[in-house]
Image (cartoon, rainbow, N blue to C red):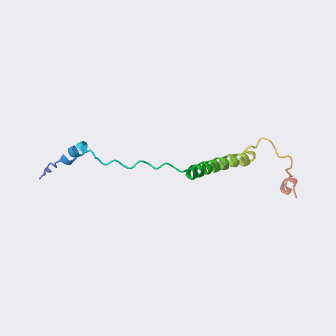
């Protein structure tokens, strides 16, 4: 036995398209000088950290040139 479902009225969807609110949100508050300076300082700190990590990490990533201060290990000398 196959049952058919009853149709559900979706009048509320049609009403939602026509609904307009007459309430306007309050205007956004402008950021103060201290907030702007703090955001700028935080951004510059993040950028400086990324640049510093690149500067410090670049010698470790370049394996082309041997280090002049490298001493041979005892294992390579056969001891």
Determine whether, in the image, residue 72 is placed left or right of residue 42: right
Quadrant of the frame with the C terminus: bottom right
* Residue projecting furthest to the left: 1
Determine whether, in the image, residue 29 is placed left or right of residue 38: left
Residue sitting nearer the eye, 40 or 55:
40
Q: What is the number of callouts on the image?
A: 0
- Residue 5, how many percent across, how many down? 15, 51
Residue sitting nearer the eye, 77 or 34:
34
Q: Residue at x 74, y 43 (%)?
A: 62
* Residue projecting furthest to the bottom: 79
Q: Which residue is drawn at 80% across and 42% down?
A: 65
| Residue 10 visible in rendering | no
| Residue 40 visible in rendering | yes
Determine whether, in the image, residue 14 is placed left or right of residue 64: left
Residue sitting nearer the eye, 53 or 39:
39
Q: Residue at x 54, y 51 (%)?
A: 32
* Residue projecting furthest to the top: 64
Q: Which residue is drawn at 31% across and 49% down?
A: 23
- Residue 21, how many percent across, how many down? 28, 47
Determine whether, in the image, residue 22 is placed left or right of residue 49: left
- Residue 66, how many percent across, how many down? 82, 44
């Amino acid at each position: 036995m196959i049952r058919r479902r009853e149709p559900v009225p979706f009048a509320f969807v049609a009403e939602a398209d026509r609904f307009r609110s007459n309430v306007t949100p309050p205007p956004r508050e402008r950021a103060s000088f201290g907030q702007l300076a703090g955001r700028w300082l935080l951004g510059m700190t993040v950028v400086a950290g990324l640049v510093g990590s690149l500067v410090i990490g670049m010698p470790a990533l370049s394996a082309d040139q041997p280090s002049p201060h490298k001493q041979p290990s005892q294992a390579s000398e056969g001891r």
